[in-house]
Image (spheres, grey):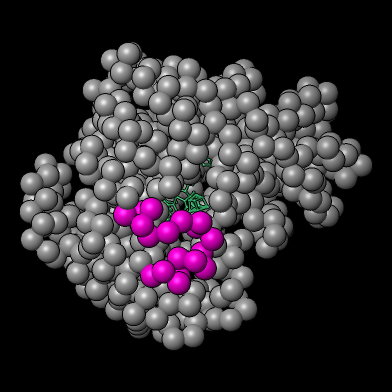
Amino acid sequence: MRVALINPRFRLPIDTRTTAHLGLAYLGAVSQKRGDTVRIFDADVEEQSVEDFIQEFKPHLIGITANTPQVKQAWRTAKAIKGVHDVPIVLGGPHPSVASEGLDYESVERPYVDMVVRGEGEGPWLEISDKLEDFLRSSEDISTAALMAPDKHLWDDVLGLTYKTSDGQVYRNMDAKPINDLDSLPWPAYNLFRMDKYTNLQPATDHVDGARSFSIMTSRGCPYRCTFCSQSIMPIKWRARTAENVIEEWRHLVRDLGAEEIGVLDDSANIRKDRLYTLSDMLIADKLNHVPWIFVNGIRANLAEKPLMAKLKEAGLLRTAFGVETGNVEILKTIDKNIDHDTIRQAFKNCKEVGLQTIGFFIIGLPGENRQTMQDTIDFAVELDPLIANFSMMTPYPGTKVYEIVKREGKLLMTDWEDYVFFEQKARYEMGDMTAELVEEMYRKAYRQFYLRPGPVMRRVQTKDFWFNLPRNLRIARRTFFKKEEKTQLRRTIEAEGLSI
Ligand code: B12
Ligand code: SF4
């Protein structure tokens, strides 16, 4: 079968560099292993239109990924495809997986979407492919309407699926089980991407443009449920690949694909420390530790003891992120992060003592905040003094506790899924003492107070990236420190092209 996987175009308001989509790389890998001819169309880097691509490739099955700000573009893409080719279209990813808010229905009710896969996609995607192939082999009428005919009951037993029969009825099957044996998954299929088009995992990695940067995921899930974190895909059950399995892929990335830096994308990589000690020993023994790697997303600060951090450094870890979130003691208690400030202080100290660079993620505008609590966060960031401090304005994603709180007690200022980005310097809700003006003011203040100090300025101008990408870096600085107008580049383009949904 010919199978196409699509990442709809969505450029962030800041010019974040692009990276190959790991979810699609996994889906592509399982399809390839099934024996399908697979193509990935990443609209962020393709010059061709999606219609031309579809007419040329004529796939039997299409999968489109969507996080929240991408979902409308996913619908536009599905509509454009159905206009040129009759093919079943499946949506998946973090946004349509939020069944608690009915966002699977929201997508499947669109006339041009046939199915939605909720949660981890590999299992349901394979089942859909198997069933479709049987159908194509055994049916005379191979139209999508025949495939989705209500009397066929083809889709009743595919766990994790929400689908629409051709009479317009929508059904939601039970959830699929989390994939327990992650070692059973094939490696992400980077061969399906135009890897020369990708650069880097901004802001966590900083090789100058052109560096070969790859991602890896060594575990899935997170045992915590912080109130602001969108966890629609990965179940609460934390599962890890064995160190042996990870090292094989790592070797492949470095030796076969020429990786010059590796971003580890796990939500919580250090839940089991013994696994990281073993992995480190293997990286050292295999002489893979010359390629710098980074914990892009934050590891748990309560599990970042000094000997472990020293071992990881020896194994090539260059930099690690921590989700600090807030500097205020009371606010920290309300976000279910299950951590305290002294533990966070100790984790940063441990990293610095062993020579690791650090990234701190901070949120401005959590529920219950006021000017003083936001200032506490800025002051705490300055105290911790990571190499990179990343402040984001609280964006309540559907399915999170913060979303519930804001719907109940506050006022959401977003009316469009395309506004669900948190680098746009616009407050996304108001609640209690927190007006939009106050949050925006404190957000800009955070960047100014943190970065416009002699230390960070000196550190930044000493990096190769700063000079190599000077115009871009100055543009980002200008946008971050000063007010900007609302419209995203994407929205402007869409309006100019007369496309809207
Ligand atoms: C790396 C990462 C990034 C990178 C790269 C993104 C990329 N191209 O993959 C960067 C830094 C660019 C990024 C940016 C953003 N990100 Co991000 N990111 C992640 C992170 C940490 C890992 C993504 C990943 O690789 N996961 C592993 C793979 C295996 O999972 P997956 O991609 O979800 O795919 C699986 C399933 O979703 C499903 N699936 C996905 N697509 C499809 C399609 C079909 C057809 C099927 C059947 C199944 C399916 O099957 C896949 C395999 O199991 C996740 C957190 C997480 N744990 O996933 C957040 C996450 C996806 N990001 C998030 C957000 C909010 C953003 C931003 C909007 C933030 C912002 N700046 O405002 C932007 C949007 C960027 C954009 N252009 O779309 C949220 C999404 C929440 C939501 N409701 O949409 C997440 C979940 C973080 C969180 N917990 O809040 N991100
Ligand atoms: S913020 Fe981190 S620790 Fe909290 S739920 Fe999300 S991934 Fe887990």
Measuring from the top left, give residue 261's x and y in whole percent: 28, 31
In the displayed structure, 317 sits above or below 299; it is above
Q: Position of residue 196 (x, y in %)?
A: 30, 31
Magenta stretch, main secondary structure, is helix
Q: Is residue 406 visible?
A: yes
The magenta span reads 328-345
* Residue 340 drawn in magenta: yes
Q: Residue at x 31, y 54 (%)?
A: 345
17 shown above or below 240:
below
The quarter of the rendered structure image containing the C terminus is bottom right
Residue 238 or residue 147, whichever sits in front = 238
| Residue lying farthest to the top in this orientation | 286
Report the number of numbered marks. Answer: 0
Residue placed most toward the observer, 221 or 423:
221
Residue 125 on the magenta segment: no
User: Where is residue 171 shown, x and y percent of the image?
Assistant: 81, 51
Residue 421 pos. (x, y %)? 43, 62
In this rendered view, identify the residue nearer to me: 60 or 344.
344
Picture quarter with the N terminus: top right
The image quadrant that residue 237 belongs to is: top right
The extreme right residue here reads 151
Left or right: where does residue 360 sit relative to residue 436?
left
Q: Is residue 232 left or right of residue 149?
A: left
Residue drawn at x 38%, y 42% as measured from the top left? 304
For the point 40% across and 48% down, which residue is it?
Answer: 301
Image quadrant in which you'd find residue 46: top left
* Residue 279, above or below 357: above
Inspect this view and state whether residue 2 appears: no
Q: What residue do we see at 45% from left, 33% from top?
A: 273
Q: Is residue 486 left or right of residue 116?
A: left
Q: Is residue 472 left or right of residue 180?
A: left
